[in-house]
Image (spheres, rainbow, N blue to C red):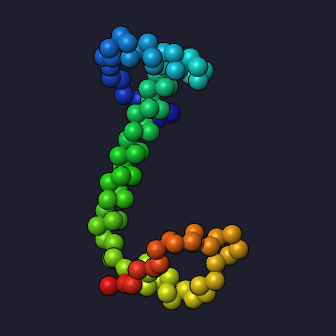
Amino acid sequence: MASVSNFALRLPPSLMEDVKAIAAADSVSVNQFIVQAVAERAAMLRDRGYLAQRAARAKPGAMTRILDIAGDDTPIPGDELPEGWPGPTTPS
């Protein structure tokens, strides 16, 4: 079994009542609800950092060059651009 850490958490009474109500509606314990909420927030922050690192390595125009190499410009029926939509940009 994985080890578990204990942490005394202080929540304002109004927030605790919300947590209890939401946990009860989801048929989970308050502890399980809080663990899941913290896990979701940690994952979101971790992913945001990862995406920021990837964005920093991005090369503007690279995707357009890849799409130009891909070939066929014929859209799949129903996937056409709307009338008046701005055309593709030229890679720099």
Vertically, is 58 above or below 26?
A: below
At x 68% / y 75%, what residue is drawn? 76
Q: Nearer the viewer, residue 43 or 48?
A: 48
At x 33% / y 76%, what residue is drawn? 60
Q: Nearer the viewer, residue 2 or 52?
A: 52
Vertically, is 84 above or below 43?
A: below
User: Quadrant of the image for the C terminus?
Assistant: bottom left
Q: Is residue 13 visible?
A: yes
Q: Residue 39 falls in which quadrant of the image? A: top left
Vertically, is 82 above or below 39?
A: below
| Image location (x, y in percent) of residue 85 | 50, 71
| Image location (x, y in percent) of residue 43 | 41, 45
Question: Horizontal placement of 85 versus 80: left or right?
Answer: left
At x 45% / y 17%, what residue is drawn? 18
In the displayed image of the protein, which residue is found farthest to the front?
Answer: 84
Q: Residue 75 falls in which quadrant of the image? A: bottom right
Question: Horizontal placement of 92 versus 3: left or right?
Answer: left
